[in-house]
Amino acid sequence: MSQTRPSPRRRGAVVIVPFGLVARILAAVVILLLLAALIASGVVARAAGGTVVADPATVATQRAAAERDLARGYDASTDQVRKAHALKLAIPAQQADAIANKALNDLATLRHSALVSLGQTLGSTTDAAETYAKSTEQAMEQQRGQPQPSFAPTLLAPRLYAIVSRFDQLATQIADQATAELTSSPSAPPASPSPTTRATPSPAPSR
Amino acid sequence: MSRAPLWGLWPWLATVLLAVVVGATVDPAALPFSGSEKIYAVFLLDGQAYFGHLEDVPWSDSVGLTDVFYLDDARKTTTDLPVGLLKRGNELHEPADGMRIRRDKVLAIERVSLDSPVGRAIAAQRAIDRLAK
């Protein structure tokens, strides 16, 4: 009688993975994905990169461009008033002179206010801005009608653009108003100002 | 002999480093501490364009912009160019913390050169803001 020994049961290889290791791997993968997404989003780069601020030369270029724009707007509006005044008008000459002179004075005041605002925006005190405005006005008058050197077109910074666009808006209103009054018939009532016109025009931005 | 306590940090540091590399692979310009400021232009399907700092999180259905500027029609003004640059935040509702744009409304996203007119105008605006303080 022979006894057969039961064949030993083959045991498969067992790998024991500690739960702590799995948790650490999962945590690492999650952190990897989150950080990768954060880096790719640009948030970290923005926080680390800082912002670029223009040098004084660039600011001076911007100021010169704004002055040029104001001079251009002033010249266009005053030319419009002078051309309307030079027409053969139906209204008496004395009345036409009064209308044209008032418009030209308003435009000069408006340009002065714009230059003061420009000076203050660029960091000048009130007195320094007044001095700057007067000297710039004189320079503009001297350069008026003379050929100007060509400049590279400049996109204005928003605060300077606000001054120039407000100046243009008000100067156009003044010139259009004067033109309408000058070219009206003697019996027609004087053109009423637009409801949006301010009593004291100021090209300073509201903010 | 016990291991130095810093040895335990290496796997985590490697994870962070790997994340930075993977993130930069998605957008190399997003690599932190590299290069200068990144300003992006986001062009919408309706033709409007916004400029600012981009936050483009992959799982979101919108992109974010902070420090936002946009172009204004300046054809009626006497500026050199027929467009003007405006800073977002001065509108009647005074948006306070940037804007979010639905991803399906975006036509293109491009990097703005800091030497471009837009880049220089934004930099000048910051200089002016500092002068005013």
Image (cartoon, rainbow, N blue to C red):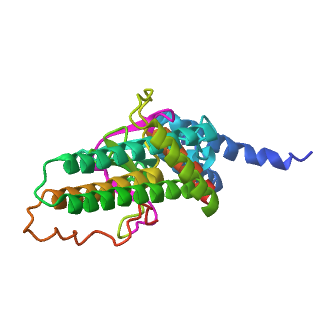
Q: Is residue A173 above or below residue B69?
A: below
Tell me which residue sits at (35%, 38%) in the image.
Answer: B81
Residue in front for this viewpoint, A114 or B9: A114
Report whether B16 appears left or right of B97: right
Residue A70 x %, y % = 41, 47
Q: Quadrant of the N terminus of chain A?
A: top right
Q: Is residue B1 above or below residue B132?
A: above
Residue A197 x %, y % = 28, 68
- Which of the 4 image quadrants contains residue B47? top left
- Which of the 4 image quadrants contains residue A19? bottom right
Residue B87 x %, y % = 43, 55
Residue A28 x %, y % = 59, 49
* Residue B55 on the magenta segment: no
Residue in front for this viewpoint, A100 or A170: A100
- Can residue B66 be seen in this snapshot? no
Q: Is residue B73 above or below residue A189?
A: above
* Residue B96 on the magenta segment: yes
Residue in front for this viewpoint, B17 or A20: B17
- Can residue B89 be seen in this snapshot? yes
Report whether B115 appears left or right of B44: right
Q: Which residues are magenta?
A: B94-117
Tell me which residue sits at (33%, 43%) in the image.
Answer: B83
Report whether B83 appears left or right of A6: left
Figure label count: 0
Tell me which residue sits at (41%, 28%) in the image.
Answer: A147
Residue in front for this viewpoint, B78 or A139: A139
Tell me which residue sits at (54%, 56%) in the image.
Answer: A121
